[in-house]
Amino acid sequence: MIIVDNALKAREAQGKPIRVGMIGAGFMGQGLTNQIVHSVPGERMTAIFNRHVAKAIKCYQYAGLEPVVANTQGAFEDAVHAGKPVVTEDPMLLCHSEQIDCLVDVTGAVEFGVRVVLEAFKHGKHVVLMNGSSTRPSARSSRSTRASTT
């Protein structure tokens, strides 16, 4: 971790923090926001999407910040450029913004997450997935596994 910590500190000193956009604003998102805001020099929680924007606002407020709501790409870009934390009900604003370096998916909604992640990839974003998936194999994969082992 020392190498990563030093690299993040260098980015902070250069004024080039990693600009994080988060998809989801539940328990995990609130904790991650608080961690980045208070304990990770070299990263910024730049924007949060949630389908209910009030939950995204609460994530920032828990960390001591007051965000602005953006519903268009122009408003999103202006707020980020001004250094304001942004919340939105449109995940594609994060995917399309050149001012977001990395998206973190904390939704727990795998199918929705895939759509967002694929769009983020189209726009050159790094992606971190923190959403859960079932460890129980589907019926189809169970049949396939049994068939291949007999």
Image (cartoon, grey):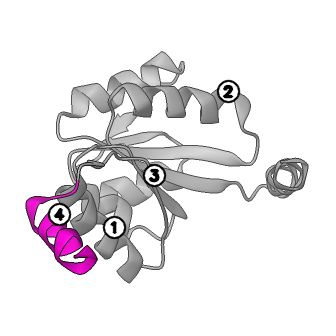
Depth check, front residue: 37 or 65? 37
- Taking depth in this image into account, of 29 and 92 the one nearest to the observer is 29
Q: Earlier in the sequence, mark 2 or mark 4?
A: 2
Classified by dominant secondary structure, the portion drawn in magenta counts as helix
Query: Which residue does the image show at 10% across and 68% down from the upper left?
Result: 140
* C-alpha distance separating marks 2 and 3: 16 Å
Mark 2 lies on residue: 38
Placement of 142 over or under 89, stated as above or below: below
Q: Position of residue 113 (x, y in %)?
A: 26, 58
For the C terminus, the image quarter is bottom left
Q: Residue at x 62, y 36 (%)?
A: 36
Q: Which mark is residue 21?
A: 3
Q: Nearer the viewer, mark 3 or mark 1?
A: 1
* Amino acid residing under circle 1: Val
* Lower sequence index among marks 2 and 3: 3
Residue 142 disc label: 4
The earlier-in-sequence mark between 1 and 2 is 2
Q: Which residues are magenta?
A: 137-150
Alpha-carbon distance for marks 1 and 2? Answer: 26 Å
Residue 86 visible here: yes
